[in-house]
Amino acid sequence: MQTTLMTIGQAVKASQVSAKAIRQYEDLGLLPPVGRRGTYRAYDSTHIQAIMLIRQAQKLGFTLAELK
């Protein structure tokens, strides 16, 4: 089974979260390690699920510090 890899722009569309927020989640270590395709980040469905879970937790009142 092949995993579909996405650029950050595609990840933004899939998750409805800004590129800035996605990079922040990555910097904080909230996302699984993100691979690279050349110089570009390569996201997959695991990353999108994690991003959506982070957003849901934030809607419930959790801070990024608490999620870390």
Image (tube, rainbow, N blue to C red):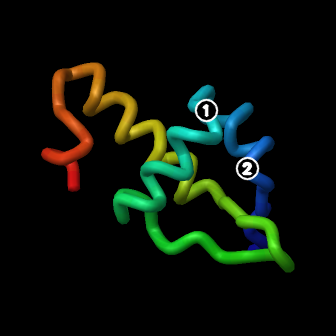
Q: Position of residue 37 (x, y in %)?
A: 82, 75
Kindly identify which residue carries mark 1.
18
Residue 16, placed above or below residue 46: above
* Residue at the spot 43% in from the left edge and 51% down from the top edge: 25
Q: Earlier in the sequence, mark 2 or mark 1?
A: 2
Q: Is residue 45 left or right of residue 64?
A: right
Kindly identify which residue carries mark 2.
8
* Residue at the spot 35% in from the left edge and 59% down from the top edge: 28
Circle 2: residue type: Ile
**Quarter of image, res 14:** top right
Spatial CA span between label 2 and label 1: 9 Å
Q: Secondary structure at mark 1?
A: loop
In depth, the one of 42 and 46 nearer the eye is 42
Residue 27, placed above or below residue 51: below
Residue 10, placed above or below residue 59: below
Q: Position of residue 47 (x, y in %)?
A: 54, 56
Q: Residues within 10 Å of mark 1 (few under 14, many from 20)?
A: some
